[in-house]
Amino acid sequence: MPLYEGIGLISEKHAVVLDIGTVYTKAGFAGETGPRCIIPTEILSGKTGKMMKLVNIHFPDDLYKFLVNFIHHLYFKYLLVNPKDRRVVIIESVLSPTLFRETVAKVLFVHFEVSSLLFVPSHLLTLFTLGISSGLVLDMGYRESQIFPIYDGILLLNSGYTLPLAAKAIHSNLENLLLNHASVHFHDRQVLLPEMTASLSKTLLEDITVRLCFATTLERSRQIQDVKRASESVHKFPPSRPPVDYPMDGDKILRIPGTVTEQAVEVLFELDHDMQTIATLVVDTLLSCPVDIRKTLAENIVVTGGTSMLPGFKSRLKSEINHLLDHPQYKDRLAIKVFKFHRPPAKENYTAWLGAAIFGSTDVLTSRSLNKEVYIKQGYVSDWANLNDNNNKSLI
């Protein structure tokens, strides 16, 4: 028998790595450079015959049924492995609800009978891909943007912030702009979009955002804001890209003005009711940290999440931060003048997954994972942030 076959027989199988997001799920195996699949977090409902999305589920029983069907879909259509044979690594948000964590554990341990399970915070995994122990991680998902400082491998929970400015806010702003300024062309006719429909589907808004929208420069944004303050129409904006014809269903063509494609992302940088933006989120987080670690964090900023992949976003964010340094609110409070952004070794939408794949291929996985026998005995998942769990020596 060849030598490599003998090694394969005695070595442990690669763990399954799952990142179950609000809108998209990444699944694959530890030790690989990318997920085997990135699919929408949705499943076909047997009762209604429609696609049921995780974002629309609010009750525990419905969540359990959804996860059973969805994880079965992952294992037997995309991963093609027996759940009982492999350990599982789950990437979780620091602010993930306890109900979701407990339901995922119950589904995997009770229904699929996996041998062990490990929950790992996504922000720590992002730094793990870069080989650094300190940094400021901004994760821009669908519902909200989360930022947490990490110093010497310790996640500083008290200094973290969240803001409901992410993909959902962009989609809402884009829909409003399209209904006000876009038109539909069909059969040699032109009508305003509101005459055809009162709302747009999330799928359509997401596709337009990914294909057409971008973050404009800070200077141009200031010019557009000056026009808005003067109550001018959209046609008075500074010259922009030409209109884009977007094909809809049938022979209908949606004509999108160039100003709409750049204005949709501006919601991330415009002050909300709490006088906050994505840029103030970064600066306020630094101010909430101890003075002696601010310089290290400012020089190790990592931006992840699908929303951050929009063209021009990172350049605009850096310009906004530098602009805030001269603002009276921050000028005398923050002495740091240099901000450096890391470029992750993977695309921003699965950087945390790559960190989990690297972590899952180490020997630490065996000692840190929660075994099925321990879970059945205690009846819940130990929380690393819970002092009672950390002091309970019987669970170690």
Image: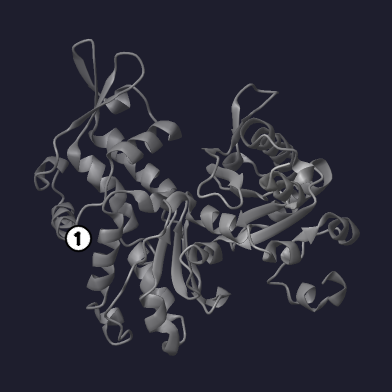
From this view, report whether residue 7 is shown above or below residue 146: above
From this view, report whether residue 328 is shown above or below residue 365: below
- Is residue 277 visible to the viewer in this orientation of the structure? no
Assign the C terminus to one quadrant of the image: bottom right
Q: State left or right for residue 136 relative to residue 1.
A: left
Locate residue 260: give its quadrant. top left
The residue depicted at 27 percent of the width and 66 percent of the height is 318
From this view, report whether residue 232 is shown above or below residue 66: below
* Residue, far front: 1
- Is residue 137 visible to the viewer in this orientation of the structure? yes
Q: Position of residue 299 (x, y in %)?
A: 36, 76
User: Along the line of sight, which residue is nearer the eye, 65 or 182?
Assistant: 65
Q: Which residue is disc 1 drawn over? A: 218
| Amino acid of disc 1 | Leu
For the residue labelled by badge 1, is the local secondary structure a helix, a strand or a loop?
Answer: helix
The residue depicted at 29 percent of the width and 27 percent of the height is 193
User: Along the line of sight, which residue is nearer the eye, 182 or 17?
Assistant: 17
The residue depicted at 43 percent of the width and 46 percent of the height is 168
Locate residue 116: give its quadrant. bottom right
* Residue, far top: 187
